[in-house]
Image: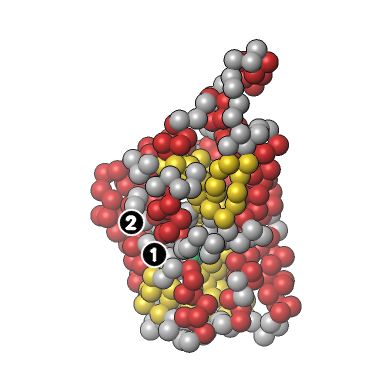
Amino acid sequence: MTSTFRTLLGGAAAAALLAAGTMAAQADNWKYAFEESLTEVQGVYATKFKEAIEANSDHTLELYPYGTLGESADIMEQAQAGILQFVDQSPGFTGALIPEAQVFFVPYLLPTDQDHLARFFKESKAINEDFQGLYANQGLELLVMFPEGEVAMTTKEPVRSCEDLNEVKFRVMTNPLLVESYKAFGATPTPLPWGEVYGGLQTNIIQGQENPTFFLYSTKMYEVTDHITYTGHNNFTTAVMANKDFYDGLSDEDKQLIQDATESAFDYIVEYQKGLADSELAKIMEAKPEMTVTVLSEEERACFKEAAADVEKTFIEMTGDSGKAILDQLKADLEATKG
Ligand code: 6CS
């Protein structure tokens, strides 16, 4: 199957133009902000992207990890304003801006199989064409979406069923559909920016949150919660974009440079993640041996799966025909990339 990453100018043609000296290459310094630290998945992706840009051009890329320029909402504003050329913002924070991006929070929609997910993100029409248009309407050139791993719940009390979430104030990203999901799961959803999560758990303002396993270790969630539960309801998706005016103003050569860097960083991150959940879970257990880890059985997942059908309906109510079209396309893409 062919990749849908776009080819804008053949490598040979670009080389010929350069050799003929018809293209004056200007060295620019670009800025790229993301929602995690340099050593977390988004940071590793950004580092690979930077390496590819700098190895193949005279441009330089400055990386701004989480916190250096504010929260996720802040870096998105800066990217839309053109202060940043690149931004990584997860759909979990993009729901208000692009309601259709909430489709990634319909529970049990994405597969848990890593290879299937990788093929889906690379080849999906919904992502590489339909979402491109929706992001473009917000002044953003969507470059890539990639998975960060299956999300797990971390809570103060054990979770084996939806009833166990009753009365649990559960932190979610600021995404209306994710709020609806956790309502349907039986919890009291509490949308918060990332910076308030550790303190919120420490002071018992919230009693649970969800994130991929690597993030539970790197952000020390195990210090402020005691139980990890895998319900299989989602895989964390993130997205990297460029400011659209900036991108549209680039030469074809620079656009190709960015597309190539995007593709090579994507291939790297997909491999990087294999086994990451297992290795980071082992580190959590080493740091806190009394942490409990539960993978819910099919039977135990039943109420979460039932809730998923309602959440899908809510998604369609929230987003209308355009959301329904994206959902249908996404399902078709998932089927086509099953392998
Ligand atoms: O839960 C969050 O808010 C964060 N989770 C991840 C895996 N990355 C960034 C995001 O801010």
Q: Which residue is mark 2?
A: 96
Q: Specify the quadrant of the image occupied by residue 132.
A: top left
Asked whether 130 or 83 is in front, the reply is 83
Q: Nearer the viewer, residue 36 or 41?
A: 36
Q: Are marks 2 and 1 in contact (CB under 8 Å)?
A: yes
Residue 297 spot, x, y in % from top left: 55, 70
**Cα distance, mark 2 to mark 1?**
8 Å
- Total numbered labels: 2
Vertical comparison of 34 with 31: above or below? below
The quadrant of the rendering that contains the C terminus is: top right
Q: Which mark is residue 212?
A: none
Looking at marks 2 and 1 on the same chain, the residue that comes earlier in the sequence is marked by 2
Amino acid under disc 1: Thr
Instruction: From the top left corner, tell me how far across and down residue 24 is, in percent.
Output: 59, 22
Q: Position of residue 241 (x, y in %)?
A: 48, 44
Is residue 315 something one can see in this rendering?
A: yes
Which label sits on residue 174? 1
Label 2 residue SS: loop
- Asked whether residue 121 appears in the rendered view, the answer is no
Identify which residue is drawn at 44% across, 73% down.
171
Q: Is mark 1 within 8 Å of ligand 1?
A: no
The residue drawn where x is 40% and y is 53% is: 77
Camera-side residue: 339 or 12? 12
Q: Amino acid at mark 2?
A: Ala
Residue 282 point in image, percent of width and height: 72, 71
Residue pictured at 69% horizontal, 49% vertical: 271
Q: Which residue is at a point 41% across and 36% down the rendered structure image?
A: 245
Q: Is residue 297 left or right of residue 55?
A: left
